[in-house]
Amino acid sequence: MTNRNITILLLIALVTGTIIYARSVNINLPGNNQGFAPEQPIAFSHRLHAGDLQIDCLYCHTGADKSRHAGTPAASICMNCHKFVTASWEQNQIEEQAAQDEKRDLKIPVSDELRKLYAAVGFDTEKMKYDKNLVGKPIEWTRIHSLPAFTFFDHRRHVNADVTCQQCHGAVESMEKVSQENDLSMGWCVNCHRDVNNGIIADFPGKHPSTNCAACHY
Amino acid sequence: MSENKNKIYWKGIEERESTPEFIKTLDSEFPAKPEEVGALFDTTKLQNSEVSRRSFLKAAGFSLAGTMFASCVRAPIEKSIPVLVKPEEITPGRAYWYATTCAGCNAGCGILTKNRDGRPIKIEGNPEHPLSGGGVCAVGQAMVLGLYDSQRLHKPVVNQESTSWEKVDVAINKKLADITDNVYFLTGTITSPSTRAAIKKFLSRFRNAEHIEYDPASYSAILDAHEENFNQRVLPHYHFDRAEVIVSFNADFLSTWLSPVEFTRDYTAGRHVEEGSTRLSKHIQLEGQMSVTGANADRRIKITTAEGRSLLFAIAKKLANKSGSRFPDWQAGTVDTAIVDEIATELWRARGKSLVICGLNDTGAQSAVNFINEKLGNYGKTLNIQRPSRQWNGNDSRVQALLARMKAGEVNALFIADSNPVYTLPNAEEFSAAFRQLSLTVSFSDHQDETSSLAQYILPAPHFLESWNDAEVASGIISVSQPTVQGLGQARSVRHTLNKWSGAGDNDLDSMKSFWRQNIYPRQSGAGSFQEFWDNSVHNGYAALRPEPISLSAFKMGQKAPQPMQANTAHDSYDLVLYQKAGMLDGRHAHNAWLQELPDPVTKAVWDNYVCLSAATAKKAGVKNGDVVNVTTGDVSFELPAIIQPGQHDKVVAVALGYGRMGTERFANAGPEWLEGKPTLKAGERVGKNGFVFVSQTEDGFLLNNTVELSATGKHVDLALTQTHHSVTVPEELGGQRRNLVRETTLAAYVKDPASGNHEKHESLQLWEQDHKYEGHHWAMAIDLGKCTGCSACVISCQAENNVPVVGKDEVFRRREMHWLRLDRYYSGDEDNVGVLHQPVMCQHCDHAPCEGVCPVLATVHSDEGLNQQIYNRCVGTRYCANNCPYKVRRFNWFDYRQKDSRENLALNPDITTRTRGVMEKCSLCVQRIQEAKAESIRQGIALADGDIKLACEQSCPADAIVFGDMNDPDSRISKLINDPRHYRMLEEMNFRPTVGYLTKVRNRQDEPSEEGRHG
């Protein structure tokens, strides 16, 4: 084989290799973060809270029906319950059993993940009290659903028009770790708006979602 | 009426004369000197370049590959960091509004601040405030930028070294322990009763201590005249809405005089033109230079300062005859008896419904004004001294006395707050020399300014948006200021500091509340408990009180004849009028880049001051626009460029105050940094020259007038004038003549025919009627030229709302100013009798928009609600749209106009995109406000009502000239205006179908026939 042919073969191999590799790792177009499911600083489980315990989405994401942003919940909202609930039911059972077996006073069990929350808000689990001196840093969650800066999405308009959270965010109540369900591209947004207007989606009678550019871009 | 002569409107002298050079500049979108264009294509430069073709291609290839790799990665990981403990009332993403009081000047307008994420980003008028009623001026709007000025002092400074409050308190208390007498407190007018009380209390421990108030643009003579005539030093509260005849001598009450926002509101309320309910006051303005107020007058008479005073005396005498009383023999010089008769007749006819005011700081003139108003029975009707204004209380003679005492070594300690005498006093050098000799000097300034930099101690006072305060702006109306942001530094209010030194507590809010409990609460009625009263006052931003009783004696003229004022007859000497400019005022906000780049409402100049001359005077002095002239009086002189100002008296030259401030050196490189960018100031040079050096001192105080000589220097500087930028022109092939874009008529013609002056109607053709039905909303705007005074509040309001960048003087020369809303100023008539019209122009949102068809990437398209949308992320910057826009309202981002001062970025509005380089932008009709209002209506389940959406320009307009609404709603205000016979659209004959329209201006004149525009 001539050098020339070898080069051609290598090039073909490189191109096909790249294509096969690209398909196997599911490369997205730039800006498309579909499937993004980062590790969060606290392993918060939406499956447990929203699924098993059936806590309403709006209980924590308080802004969703009244602001453009749904909002990452403040630690104080977690503390509404976790001031009292410090560990899982299993952990509590084990501790109760152990205390009974060892004939000692019950020690309050604290889960490792919740310790991070308590460190942030300055909650002393020994005394079950807030301690100003213990207040740490706010929790740095990683943002999953993110739109470009020139796009203004308003949660309030969608929630108040009876669009469910799941329609865009997927079945979050079944996600142990939240991942981005949809690609959040403009085409995806506009398809829904158009389908509602054309009656293809019939869940929103009397609603006429705008397909004007300035509905989102200004 | 078609036989009438055509009235030609012109924006500048060069346009009226239509010189070939000027026509040429209109053809190109941006001016470029031939040598500049040549430089860009200079092949020798390229050939001599060290970069070879090969290495250029290499670099280009690497850049391309690098960009590809970079774009393959995911978007950057963003953190979402919520607060630990969420305040119950705050939801991220929602704006919160707080009522407070503007301290941009002393007028104390009620404002609402829009807060996002704990910081104020926009100031709007408080519609419920009894004085300002929803309007706010350009200065007020710009105060939000001043808050984020990084040159503000945040810590006390002792002998130019930063220190802590603890150390300062100890050091000053130690010094004060040794001082027992001769302590002086020099301030601007203090409208805050609680601060006034704190100063009084602090001074009470010293013998021979005095609190002196001083306003650089002084109104002292009005107060002094009232003391002479009514035995009470008061400033009347004027009610322009109740006046049918307004005669103003040199008082620019629609722009800077006393309380311009309130006056503009009242003035336009008295000028209501509507079929069936027309009520139009007659406004006569006598002035030497062309002011905003003069531009709006029904009749404008050019006078010199001395002529004005003589006229006043003559009119007083005439009215004394009519009313059977006697006016003293104060006559200086000859007067035009026709004018005297005309004004006296008008005034006499409108007894009790007229108002005479005078802007001259001369007690004689002000006494004559009082005499006239008294004899006309205007007191208690159009002006009120039972419930006087408290906005300005300066006393010039006491300032002069203070200086004399300082020079005599009779002052032990001087405290200065809210005042900058080293900058504003005509004899500043004497003052600063004496000031340096004092044993204790303390300045409560938030900047290193001319005065504070000489003081031993600078104790920074907070910005009004970060502190508590109160202001009794008129007797019986008290406004409250509340902090809208946590203090950005460690500034401490004057009241706080003084109370601390007096041992009256260390909590500013507590001390203010306790003052209110003792002094303000007893004067109110309505609220049960103090807490209820306080809560209501803070919530509303103001409270109504019982006015303090005031004992006035019956009117009597003073015994002393005023100093004669020599008529200025010498051949080459001129009357100098020092005037305050909208935005710059007395220079207190010279650090504010928005205000520096705000085109002057009349001259349309930015970033400089200049000498305004009439065309004849300029010819005599041998200067053209931009030629530097030397202005001299005695041993004071400075050099400033000349501007030829139509409508100016030939014997009057005018110079704006407020320039040449210390600290404006920072603007030398304002604007983007790039290859061709040039600094506009030499090292250490300040923006403009300080006009206060020309203030003359009389017995009565500081007179903003002088007699000067002019001489050409042969130098020339370029003036950054925006007046002929973005001119609407018609190309040669389409007729090439000027269109009547502004329309006006007279009251006489209007009464006969409400559509007078507005007969040019054109059939509008529709090609796509079926495709564009505008079935939901169809947004539209109407601007009443009869109400618009040209005050320019809307320009800054738009700038603040829409993140419009400051481009700097160098870029303004290239016509690249970014204001989405410009105020076109047109002159009409000839040099002797020039008329002025203002017209706000922004994107006209044409239903047949010429810009939309030419965009190759569909970045500008029409919405089904009639908005012309500009989509920044689609725009690739071809600029075809701007070239095709007949109204010249599109602005291109030549650069990333980031603020040099990164802290100023905190004033950006997060509700809209901040545009980047290479993108076209223009007025969006505040689509973010439309969207917000719609979202709230959906959330609350209430349908949108007319007036729910207020655009930024509309909201701040003190004259209520701008109306926005849905023209599909037949009951909306906008629908009514569109059906008004005065309504017209610009370039209607071109069939662009703009949704922004205008209403003809009606002037209260009988003489002039109605003007028909020429047809295209």
Image: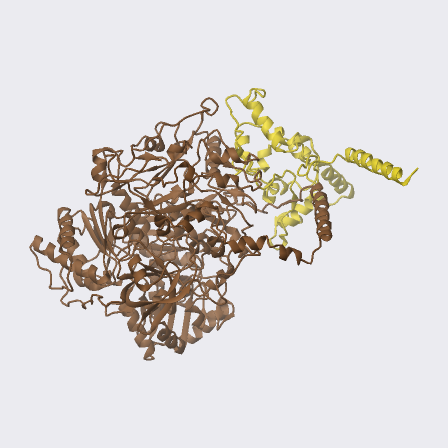
Chain colours: A yellow, B brown
Work out whether residue B213 or residue B705 is closer to the camera in this orientation and state it.
Answer: B705
Q: In the drawing, does residue B887 fall left or right of residue B253? A: right
Which residue is most to the bottom?
B408
Work out whether residue B626 or residue B691 is closer to the camera in this orientation and state it.
Answer: B626
**Residue B486 visible within the image:** no
* Residue B1 in which image quadrant: top left
Which residue is most to the left?
B324
Q: In the drawing, does residue B462 fall left or right of residue A108? A: left
* Residue B633 in which image quadrant: bottom left
Work out whether residue A208 or residue B345 is closer to the camera in this orientation and state it.
Answer: B345
Q: In the drawing, does residue B923 fall left or right of residue A186? A: left
The residue that appears at 44% across and 48% down in the rendered structure is B24
Q: With respect to residue B171, does A205 lie above or below?
A: above
Quadrant in which the C terminus of chain B is drawn: top left
Q: With respect to residue A205, does B142 lie above or below?
A: below
Q: In the drawing, does residue B191 fall left or right of residue A82? A: left
| Residue A156 image offset from top left, x and y in percent | 53, 34
| Residue B96 image offset from top left, x and y in percent | 47, 44
**Residue B913 visible within the image:** yes
How many numbered circles does the render carry? Answer: 0
The residue that appears at 52% across and 51% down in the rendered structure is B906
* Residue A22 in which image quadrant: top right
Q: With respect to residue B264, does B1000 lie above or below?
A: above
Q: With respect to residue A191, does B381 lie above or below?
A: below
| Residue A214 image offset from top left, x and y in percent | 52, 35
| Residue B816 image offset from top left, x and y in percent | 48, 50
Which residue is most to the right?
A1
The residue that appears at 42% across and 51% down in the rendered structure is B21
